[in-house]
Amino acid sequence: MAEPKSYRNFIDGEWVEASSRGALEDRSPADKGEVIGTFQDSGEADADAAIAAAARAFRRWRLVPAPKRAEYLFRMGEILLKRKEEYAREMTREMGKPIREARGDVQEAIDVCYHLAGEGRRLHGHTTPSELPNKACFSVRAPIGVCGLITPWNFPMAIPSWKLIPALVCGNAVVLKPASDAPLSSYHLVKICQEVGIPRGVVNYVTGSGAAVGGRLTAHPEVRLISFTGSSEVGRLVNLACADTFKRASLEMGGKNAMIVMDDARLDLAVDGAVWGAFATAGQRCTATSRIIVHKKVLKDFVDRLVERAGGLKIGDPLQESVDLGPLVNEAQLKKVMDYVQIGRDEGADPVLGGVRLTKAEYGRGFFFPPTIFTGVTPEMRIAREEIFGPVVCVLAADGLDDALAIANDTLYGLSSSIYTQDVNRAFTAARDLETGITYVNASTIGAETHLPFGGVKRTGNGHREGAAHTALDIFTEWKTVYVDYSGKLQKAQIDNG
């Protein structure tokens, strides 16, 4: 077999090796014997070099007119569109999501490029009358500076695009640190930045551990913003580290998302949503349906249908078009899921489907775990409260809408939620009262569209909303207020107008 390709860091417009000369292997989770490539095991010195390059480039890039910056992003979308299938297949190989989902991941990056390219001709500010004569007042968006982007492995092109593209259109320079389990998709994104001619130093790419590279980004005084997507535990540490140098921190973290199924729901539709929400990407989504709260009147019927449907999902090589469920991303994640399944058993929940690692020959070289459904779950159980991040869903019973809403809101997280009902009054009550940043009616807890705000409340986030929505611009810009006095004399606001 040919030697796996070696990928380098991208610093100041050059592809360079890490100063340590160390390397990290990127292995396929469907076949742990397959090495996708080797990437740089970078350290603080490499992060420092990238930050310095970004700081130099920022001074020039911020002066490029925003419509011109946006033209680069539109061209990126055009290239991504042409290479969608190629990049989707490589994404599936490196992190295991089925090929159909990988195509959607790349499409999301395409959508982000096209949408935010339009913002280059908007980036709206505000004008307002002055309280004094012969004086103009307005506010504009100004770039922040060097932005550190720390991204996860589960959406290895979509989420980096959520951060990279708005940062660039707003005039910032960036250092991107992808997750070590899926650095190849970010590499492709950065390579396209180079292809379209984004000036050297504006985009930098450094692979390595979160402690070495991510830690340096959060500590370095010249980095003015950290955009982080990952676990709530790590996000808390990022937030604390950013506080030392008064960085802005945008945090998108965990979820324990609930789907409510009322007694008037169309059960076949609800089952469709439950299967998609719980088991897409093998449950490795922050918006995954982790809890299903079902009205007692339809509980047995719903569970019977859900077990039948989930039991028929095809598990296997994620590059095959017919496969519904691929592997977990690595052995540590597989062990975590297996540990939680045992916790559920110990707590008295009933695993009515799955619950045992797949070990047949076709699965033995990868990290495969079947769809797993627990019934008899109560709200105080750990499996109902803690994020599992695997193909495991808990079914809980509710007496009615008020009870279901109370159960759904009894969590430390608040990312996504959904309700299945044919009653418009129940739907609007749930949309108002569910304590989440995203709510779906008669749809699953997954499937956000890029042009709308994405993010959550409680331990899911710290108030920012990413994606390609206008709210992303608030993350990557500062507001500047400008007063122009053309009266030719000193005017004292509030004093002269008092």
Image: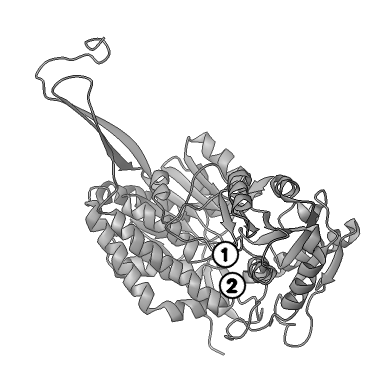
* Secondary-structure class at tag 1: loop
Residue 228, given in percent of the width and then of the height, sits at 53, 51
Q: Is 180 placed left or right of 274 in the picture?
A: left
Residue 131, given in percent of the width and then of the height, sits at 23, 20
Using the image, determine if residue 185 lies above or below residue 435: below
Q: Name the residue rendered at 78%, 85% in the picture.
A: 360
Q: Is residue 206 visible?
A: no
* Secondary-structure class at tag 2: helix
The quadrant of the image that shows the C terminus is: top left
Residue 175, given in percent of the width and then of the height, sits at 43, 54
Q: Name the residue rendered at 46%, 77% in the picture.
A: 87
User: Would you name the residue on which mark 1 appears?
Assistant: 153
Furthest residue toward left: 488
Task: Indicate the amino acid at tag 2.
Answer: Met
Using the image, determine if residue 497 lies above or below residue 147: above
Task: Indicate the amino acid at tag 1.
Answer: Trp
Q: Is 15 placed left or right of 317 in the picture?
A: left
Q: Is residue 115 visible?
A: yes
Q: Earlier in the sequence, mark 1 or mark 2?
A: 2
* Label 2 environment density (alpha carbons within 10 Å; few <14, some 14–19, many ≥20): many
Decide: marks 1, 2 in contact (CB < 8 A)? yes
Along the viewing direction, whichever of 428 and 95 lies nearer the viewer: 428
